[in-house]
């Protein structure tokens, strides 16, 4: 994400000269369907995002000051890279003291990856960062963009009524009617509005007539100041097992030059082939210093290495069990932990730990 020194802000003030907004939100538009419109040929193209004031005049009815920061060149979410995540984290760091909350407008295809990555990069996050977007462009009659954005804005500044403290001090995804922890989200639908689910962790909130928060599931407010990490190691890969996978394929993946980490998508509760060639491939990769994180292909459930014979040998080889982590959260966790450049022992230990609520231990 190559950004200019300063990006122009679009300010949206509430209606009425005497209005004293209760809060302020920075909306960061990175790209995606939410900011698209149809050209004369019927093709979806990025719109100039300052048009949001015209397309969503209801934004001025909110009791908050909105600043909209639009990237110079919107990114199709299929083209998002680790460098983009670092740039987004840097933007939040730069503006952290000036806003009560943040909303990131993002394409749906890789939103779960981006939200997971930001959850790791923003350590000791004491404000709300909500990722949202839409399945239908904002200019269409049956768009879901309006409801998603307006509810995300409400959530970004939500406070406890008694203490006045931040209600959702974490990175999350809001879509349709669910607020999901960012590193628990998974895109499961491309044709319906309910695009995201969290199978192994309860929603943080549900939006109906009111937003009903699930307070016991929230992360606690940190006692330390925000620390924004600026390193990710992208020398990682996902290897999804399937019946009939060959040694040539496995070696081609695990022997990529410079590879440091692999998310191994196994069957059921973490089971994998016991063929000698397969185990030798894993052993050779471990010898070269490749960290292997075992993640189940199942959307629900968890990895329990050693429950069956077909997974006990993975433990013996030093493969790390990923518990109930999603593949999206696992690959970004590998990037983050490897980017810390810790010792081999500490790196392996961190991969087993719950860093930002991404896994349920025990």
Image (cartoon, grey):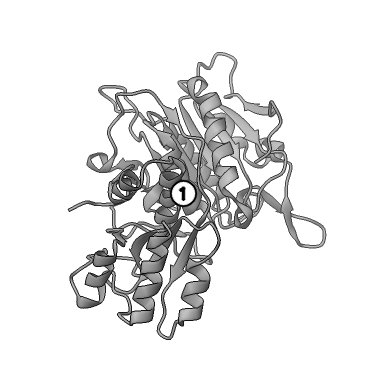
Q: Position of residue 250 (x, y in %)?
A: 46, 74
Q: Residues within 10 Å of mark 1 (few under 14, many from 20)?
A: many
Q: At numbered mark 1, what does the secondary structure look like: helix, strand or loop? A: helix
Is residue 251 something that shows in the picture? yes
Q: Looking at the image, is 197 positioned above or below residue 297? A: above
Judged from this view, the residue extending furthest toward the bottom is: 244
Q: Which residue is mark 1?
A: 335
The structure residue drawn at horizontal position 29% and vertical position 24%, both measured from the top left corner, is 223
Q: Quadrant of residue 222?
A: top left
Between 153 and 185, the one lying in front of the other is 185
Q: Position of residue 159 (x, y in %)?
A: 34, 28
Q: Position of residue 195 (x, y in %)?
A: 47, 60
Between 28 and 271, the one lying in front of the other is 271
The structure residue drawn at horizontal position 63% and vertical position 33%, both measured from the top left corner, is 69
Position of the N terminus, as image quadrant, is top right
The structure residue drawn at horizontal position 35% and vertical position 28%, both measured from the top left corner, is 166
Is residue 178 something that shows in the picture? no
Q: Looking at the image, is 362 positioned above or below residue 265? A: above
Q: Quadrant of residue 105?
A: top right
Q: Looking at the image, is 167 positioned above or below residue 210? A: above
Q: How many marks?
A: 1
Q: Quadrant of residue 312?
A: bottom left
Q: Position of residue 127 (x, y in %)?
A: 40, 30
Between 274 and 244, the one lying in front of the other is 274
């Amino acid at each position: 994400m190559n950004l200019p020194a300063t990006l122009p802000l679009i300010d949206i003030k509430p209606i009425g000269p005497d209005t004293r907004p209760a809060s302020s939100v920075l909306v960061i538009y990175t790209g995606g369907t939410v900011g698209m419109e149809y050209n004369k040929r019927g093709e979806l193209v990025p719109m100039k995002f300052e048009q949001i004031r015209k397309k969503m005049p209801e934004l001025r009815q909110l009791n908050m000051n909105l600043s909209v920061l639009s990237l110079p060149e919107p990114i199709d979410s299929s083209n998002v890279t680790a460098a983009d995540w670092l740039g987004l984290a840097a933007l939040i760091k730069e503006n952290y003291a000036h806003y009560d909350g943040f909303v990131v407008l993002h394409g749906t295809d890789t939103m779960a990856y981006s939200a997971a990555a930001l959850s790791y990069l923003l350590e000791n996050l004491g404000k709300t960062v909500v990722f949202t977007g839409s399945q239908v462009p904002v200019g269409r009659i049956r768009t879901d963009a309006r409801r998603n954005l307006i509810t995300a804005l409400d959530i970004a500044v939500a406070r406890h009524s008694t203490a006045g403290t931040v209600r959702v001090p974490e990175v999350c995804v809001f879509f349709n009617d669910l607020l999901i922890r960012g590193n628990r989200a998974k895109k499961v639908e491309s044709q319906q509005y309910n695009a995201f689910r969290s199978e192994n962790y309860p929603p943080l909130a549900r939006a109906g007539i009111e937003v009903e928060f699930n307070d016991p599931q929230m992360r606690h407010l940190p006692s330390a100041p925000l620390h924004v990490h600026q390193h990710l190691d992208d020398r990682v890969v996902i290897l999804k097992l399937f019946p009939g996978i060959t040694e040539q394929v496995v070696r081609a993946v695990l022997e990529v030059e410079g590879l440091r980490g692999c998310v191994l998508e196994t069957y059921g509760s973490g089971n994998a082939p016991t063929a000698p060639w397969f185990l030798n491939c894993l052993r050779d990769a471990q010898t070269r210093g490749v960290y292997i994180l075992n993640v189940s292909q199942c959307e629900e459930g968890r990895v329990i290495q050693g429950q069956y014979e077909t997974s006990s040998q993975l433990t013996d080889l030093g493969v790390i069990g990923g518990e109930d982590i999603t593949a999206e959260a696992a690959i970004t966790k590998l990037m983050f932990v490897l980017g810390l450049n810790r010792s081999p022992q500490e790196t392996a230990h961190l991969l087993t730990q719950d860093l930002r609520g991404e896994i349920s231990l025990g």
